[in-house]
């Protein structure tokens, strides 16, 4: 479904666009979609809307057939990609699981600002982005997903999330559609 409306109290959530994940083999590349995410972040800041930058510092415990052991991350691994131009007013969430709401202050932060809708971008579409979208939906937020500002290491998983999962959680569109509609709504 195309984006129909954006609430006046909308926040941007940028998932895992950090130096440690920038070189993951994804199509489109993480660097490419980070440029789109940065465009959205710049627009949200210009409108004085909340920008939340999320990074991942670990993984949930438990066995999984495809679990990754990242070991001790190198210096700078958690730092956000420079293209995002992190600002002092950006809210930073460091997560230990796929979703940005689990064991973090994200829901409290958004509700304190009376946010009713979120736009989500980032990596990986089928992991961090999808988990965060599911949790946002469960918290009662209207969810919009800017699909040209997200990528995945698995093209099939990316396509599945965009075409089958996201339409059940919210609305999808492009960065330019989000900017145009949000600009119109706030005019």
Image (spheres, helix red, strand yellow):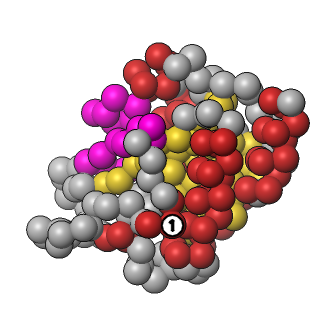
Q: Can residue 99 be seen here? A: no
Q: Nearer the viewer, residue 109 or 142?
A: 109
Residue 169 placed where, x, y %?
A: 65, 39
Residue 82 placed where, x, y %?
A: 44, 66
Taking the magenta stretch, the answer to whether it contains residue 7 is no
Residue at position x 77%, y 33% in the image: 6
Side (left or right) of 111 relative to 66: right
Residue 3 vertical placement versus 148 (above, below):
above
Residue 27 vertical placement versus 71 (above, below):
below
**Magenta region: which residues?**
89-106
Q: Nearer the viewer, residue 159 or 27?
A: 27
Side (left or right) of 97 relative to 36: left
Q: Quadrant of residue 163?
A: bottom right
Residue 41 placed where, x, y %?
A: 59, 50
Residue at position x 65%, y 64% in the image: 36
Taking the magenta stretch, the answer to whether it contains residue 105 is yes
Determine which residue is flagged by label 1: 83
Q: Residue furthest left?
A: 72
Side (left or right) of 19 relative to 168: left
Provide the major secondary structure of the magenta segment. loop
Screen quadrant of the C terminus: top right
Other residues around mark 1 within 10 Å, as few (<14) / some (14–19) / many (≥20): some
Residue 168 placed where, x, y %?
A: 69, 41
Residue 124 vertical placement versus 11 (above, below):
below
Q: Nearer the viewer, residue 8 or 167?
A: 8
Q: Quadrant of residue 44?
A: top right
**Dot 1 lies on which element?**
helix
Q: Can residue 74 be seen here? A: yes
Residue at position x 62%, y 51% in the image: 42
């Amino acid at each position: 479904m195309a984006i129909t409306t954006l609430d006046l109290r909308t926040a941007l959530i940028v998932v895992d666009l950090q130096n440690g994940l920038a070189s993951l083999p994804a199509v489109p590349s993480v660097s490419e979609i980070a440029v789109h995410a940065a465009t959205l972040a710049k627009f949200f800041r210009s409108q004085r809307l909340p920008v939340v930058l999320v990074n991942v510092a670990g993984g949930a415990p438990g066995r999984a057939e495809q679990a990754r052991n990242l070991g001790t991350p190198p210096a700078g691994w958690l730092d956000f990609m420079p293209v995002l131009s992190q600002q002092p007013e950006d809210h930073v969430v460091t997560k230990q699981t796929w979703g940005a709401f689990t064991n973090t202050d994200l829901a409290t932060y958004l509700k304190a600002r009376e946010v009713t809708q979120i736009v989500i971008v980032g990596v990986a579409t089928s992991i961090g982005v999808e988990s965060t979208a599911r949790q946002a939906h469960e918290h009662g937020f209207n969810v919009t997903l800017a699909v040209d500002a997200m990528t995945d290491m698995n093209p099939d998983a990316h396509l599945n999330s965009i075409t089958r999962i996201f339409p059940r959680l919210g609305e999808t569109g492009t960065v330019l559609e989000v900017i145009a509609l949000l600009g119109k709504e706030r005019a």
